Image (cartoon, rainbow, N blue to C red):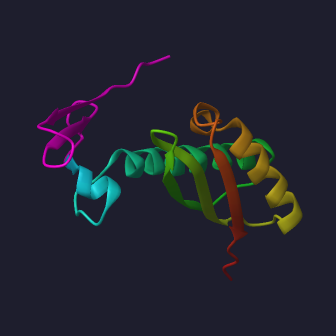
Amino acid sequence: MASRKGSAEWKGDLASGQGTLCVGDGRFEGVYTAASRFGDGKETNPEELIATAHAACFSMALSHVLAEEGFNPVSVKTEASVRLEKSGDGFAVTTIELETEAEVPGIDDATFQQHAETAVLNCPVSKALSSCDIRLSAHLVYKP
């Protein structure tokens, strides 16, 4: 399997410094700051990147599970919220909330919910973040 990379550099102290990060070989580059992590800063932060990775991975995992079971998902859209909280002398990512909407013809809600639960358990990013409380809210979208 392939190995994926990201990099980051921080300059200065925590309060007044800032960092730059790069996804892969420059597919995305951005600035991150303490203000964006702990306050209202406009830059990105590590928790947003975790949320994005988890949302992307889960959407793929659910699409895969559905296809393996004979369903043809039209769309799976997921939003992840990552909670960073004070923990002891530092901070910890404690909770991740996944909210997904899927358009899947020919599936009932109970079956969809079962497949969504399977996907969250088998999603590689969910596995990597298994020390967190991962909460899933999955919704079917019906289109005529």
Vertical order, 141 against 45 (above or below): below
Q: Could you say which quadrant of the image residue 8 lies in?
A: top left
Place of residue 10 in the rendered image (x, y in percent of width and height, measured from the top left): 17, 35
Residue located 78% across and 50% down the image:
117
Q: Residue furthest front?
A: 89
Instruction: Write down the region rendered in magenta.
Output: 1-30
Task: Give the x, y percent position of residue 69.
Answer: 81, 46
Q: Using residue 80 as the reference point, say whether residue 74 is left or right of it.
A: right
Q: Is residue 112 above or below residue 70?
A: below
Residue lying at the far bottom of the rendered structure? 144
**Residue at (72% x, 70% y) in the render:** 140
Q: Tell me the residue at 58%/31% (across/down).
A: 128
Of 101 and 91, nearer the camera is 91
Q: Is residue 21 left or right of residue 108?
A: left
- The quadrant of the picture occupied by the C terminus is bottom right
Q: Is residue 13 visible?
A: yes
Residue sitting nearer the eye, 68 or 112: 112
The answer, for residue 108, to whether it is visible in the render is: no
Q: Is residue 9 above or below residue 104?
A: above
Q: Quadrant of residue 64?
A: top right
Asked if 142 appears above or below 22 in the picture, the reply is below
Whether residue 25 appears in magenta in the rendering, the answer is yes
Query: Looking at the image, which residue is at 61% across and 57% down?
Result: 98
Give the side of residue 101 with respect to residue 48, left or right: right
